[in-house]
Image (cartoon, rainbow, N blue to C red):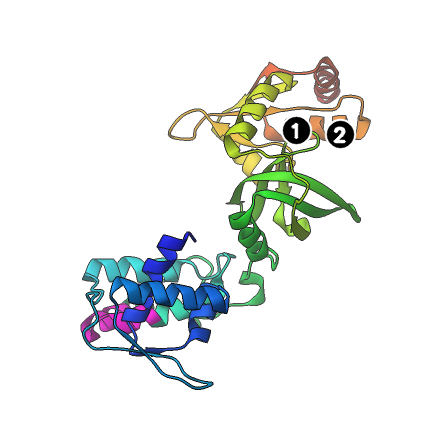
């Protein structure tokens, strides 16, 4: 969070309380004591009236003539926020533990009539994965991979990362520039640019065992990475288009090295690009099996002759 945004948020946080401590500010905004003290001084300089209390457990009292207006939500805004919280249940999303405190703060900001509306919504609406008799139940299987929040926290600091991935009982390290984190078919995936091989990689979060900031990185940014990826597209030796049935098959299963680019707003057609190492017989065989799995609704725009030969051999065998 940028400093200006943090100061504004702290002002809102303070204005909704009659009393707070430095420790609360540090914990709420994940900042050091010196930063918290400096931010509070800036808030006072802006004009929010505070009165400090000395002592080991001392804090700050907010005077009644606070300059900020109280936060008011319309009925529809309250419904939107609460339904969003409800929909996040059982979705393997990060920061689930913070959802409860957010709900409590929301309830503390709204009127009693609005609270009654939320109680009715909570009793009426059920989302996929919710246990009917225990809607607030959050099982261990509903929680995301434990390292996901750490990955997000590091990404907000620096996108140049070292990812340790366990593959076939072997831990491999990837030095990457993280482009996107996305959730597909209930699994979190990392789309990243490999800074060593300069290839685009799709890595599953479920296999991630450690993440660190890459200290010896080359200075780069997202624009430079996307330009390099664009230049590398000419090196792809497999380019195919997929219709809706093939897209549905792709969503059921696809190797982590492949990703789709939709070519129409209805996502009924997609383009797949990738590189296949035809000298690796295991990779060649697995790719051929997967292409057959996609079904008939694919069209090859570019394909290695070795893959084409294996496909024809398999099709002739079954004909």
Instruction: Name the element at disc 2.
Output: helix
Residue 317, horizontal then vertical, whole percent:
75, 20
Towards the viewer: 88 or 191: 191
Residue 184 falls within the magenta-colored stretch: no
Looking at the image, which residue is at 32% across and 70% down?
14
316 lies above or below 254: above
Which residue in the structure is indicated by mark 1? 198
- C-alpha span from label 2 to label 1: 20 Å
> In what quadrant of the picture does the C terminus appear?
top right
Q: Is residue 241 left or right of residue 215?
A: left
- Image position, residue 36 (x, y; %): 43, 67
User: x, y (%) of residue 295?
Assistant: 59, 27
- Which mark's residue is nearer the viewer, 2 or 1? 1
Residue at 66%, 44% in the rendered image: 214
- CB atoms of marks 2 and 1 within 8 Å: no
Q: Between residues 227 and 98, which one lies in front from this camera angle?
A: 227
Residue at x 41% of width, y 51% of height: 2
Q: Which residues are magenta?
A: 105-120
Q: Is residue 300 above or below residue 150?
A: above
Q: Is residue 113 above or below residue 267?
A: below
Q: Which residue is mark 2?
A: 283
Asked if residue 244 lies left or right of residue 214, the reply is left
User: Of residues 92 and 57, which is closer to you in this image?
Assistant: 57
Question: Magenta: predominant secondary structure element?
Answer: helix
Neighbor class of circle 1 (other Cα within 10 Å; few <14, some 14-19, many 20+) is some
Between discs 2 and 1, the one toward the N terminus: 1
Element type at marker 1? loop
């Amino acid at each position: 969070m940028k400093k200006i945004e943090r100061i504004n948020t702290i002002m809102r946080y303070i204005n909704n309380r009659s009393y707070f401590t430095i420790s609360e500010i540090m914990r709420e905004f994940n900042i050091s004591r010196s930063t918290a003290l400096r931010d509070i001084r800036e808030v006072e300089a802006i004009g929010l009236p505070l009165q400090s209390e000395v002592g080991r457990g001392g804090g700050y009292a907010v005077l009644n003539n606070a300059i900020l207006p109280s936060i008011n939500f319309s009925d529809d805004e309250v419904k939107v926020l609460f339904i969003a919280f409800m929909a996040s249940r059982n979705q393997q999303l990060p920061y689930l533990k913070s959802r409860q405190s957010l709900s409590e703060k929301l309830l503390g900001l709204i009127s009693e009539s609005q609270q009654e509306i939320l109680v009715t919504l909570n009793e009426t609406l059920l989302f996929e994965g919710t246990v009917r008799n225990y809607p607030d139940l959050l099982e261990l299987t509903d929680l995301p991979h434990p390292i996901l929040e750490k990955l997000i926290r590091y990404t907000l600091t620096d996108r140049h990362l070292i990812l340790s991935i366990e593959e076939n009982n072997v831990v491999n390290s990837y030095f990457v520039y993280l482009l996107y984190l996305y959730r597909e078919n209930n699994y979190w995936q990392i789309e990243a640019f490999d800074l060593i091989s300069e290839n685009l990689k799709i890595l599953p979060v479920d296999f991630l065992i450690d993440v660190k900031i890459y200290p010896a990185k080359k200075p780069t940014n997202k624009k430079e990475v996307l330009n390099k990826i664009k230049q590398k597209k000419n090196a792809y030796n497999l380019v195919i288009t997929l219709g809706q049935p093939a897209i549905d098959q792709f969503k059921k299963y696809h190797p982590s090295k492949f990703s789709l680019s939709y070519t129409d707003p209805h996502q009924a057609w997609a383009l797949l690009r990738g590189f296949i190492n035809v000298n690796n017989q295991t990779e060649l065989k697995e790719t051929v099996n997967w292409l057959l799995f996609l079904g008939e609704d694919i069209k090859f725009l570019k394909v290695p002759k070795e893959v084409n030969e294996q496909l024809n051999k398999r099709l002739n065998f079954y004909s």
